[in-house]
Image: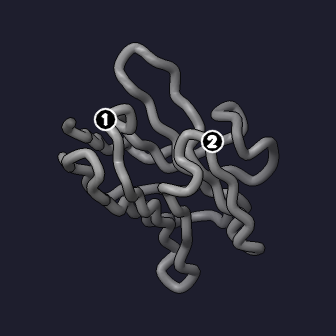
């Protein structure tokens, strides 16, 4: 089992920045990712990172604004979100997996509890 604990999200004005963290414990994993779910919408991929190679992947909607990173020593993943837009408002989830397409929710076995990010216009 992998346990994932996210930091608190928050309320930020459009154009602002916010950093989320996700602390992992338990078994090892290969890929960690961030997803988000807005009210009435399906959960969607935001970003992912391969734990050993640092390779990163981003949704087109956040590319150039969000940065995913990880700290091996702390076993923690981060999502730095800049130039936030109202459409970024959602519950953000961190997730981990060992094998499969990094973009698909179906391939992630472990999930955090989710944290609310609200961007006001």
Identify the residue at image location x=25%, y=54%.
Answer: 8
* Res. 96 visible in picture: no
Q: Residue furthest right?
A: 100
Identify the residue at image location x=77%, y=73%.
Answer: 53
Q: CA distance from mark 2 to mark 1?
A: 16 Å
- The circle drawn on residue 60 is 2
Mark count: 2
| Residues marked 2 and 1 touching at CB (< 8 Å) | no
Q: Decide: few, some or many residues near mark 1? Use Cα within 10 Å; few <14, some 14-19, many ≥20.
A: some
Q: Position of residue 104 (x, y in %)?
A: 70, 35
Q: Residue furthest bottom?
A: 73
Seen from the viewer's position, the closer of residues 92 and 59 is 59
Seen from the viewer's position, the closer of residues 17 and 114 is 17
Read off the residue under disc 1.
86
Instruction: Label 1, secondary structure: give it.
Output: helix
Tell me if 80 is positioned left or right of 32 in this view.
left
Instruction: Label 2, secondary structure: give it.
Output: loop
Image quarter where the C terminus lies is top left
Disc nearer the start of the sequence (2/1): 2
Would you place residue 120 above or below residue 72 in this image?
A: above
* Res. 52 visible in picture: yes
Q: Position of residue 118 (x, y in %)?
A: 25, 39
Q: Position of residue 22 (x, y in %)?
A: 43, 61
Identify the residue at image location x=39%, y=14%.
Answer: 40
Would you place residue 89 above or below residue 83 in this image?
A: above
- The circle drawn on residue 70 is none
Q: Decide: few, some or many residues near mark 2? Use Cα within 10 Å; few <14, some 14-19, many ≥20.
A: few
């Amino acid at each position: 089992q992998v346990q994932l604990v996210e930091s608190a999200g928050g309320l930020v004005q459009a154009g602002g920045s916010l950093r989320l963290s996700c602390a992992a414990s338990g078994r090892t994993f290969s890929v960690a990712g961030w997803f988000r779910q807005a009210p009435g919408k399906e959960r969607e991929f935001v970003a992912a990172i391969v734990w050993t190679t640092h390779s990163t992947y981003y949704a087109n909607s956040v590319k150039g604004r969000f940065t995913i990173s990880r700290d091996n020593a702390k076993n923690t993943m981060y999502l730095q979100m800049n130039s936030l837009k109202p459409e970024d408002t959602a519950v953000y989830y961190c997730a981990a997996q060992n094998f499969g397409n990094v973009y698909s929710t179906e391939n992630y076995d472990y999930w955090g509890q989710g944290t609310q990010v609200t961007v006001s216009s």
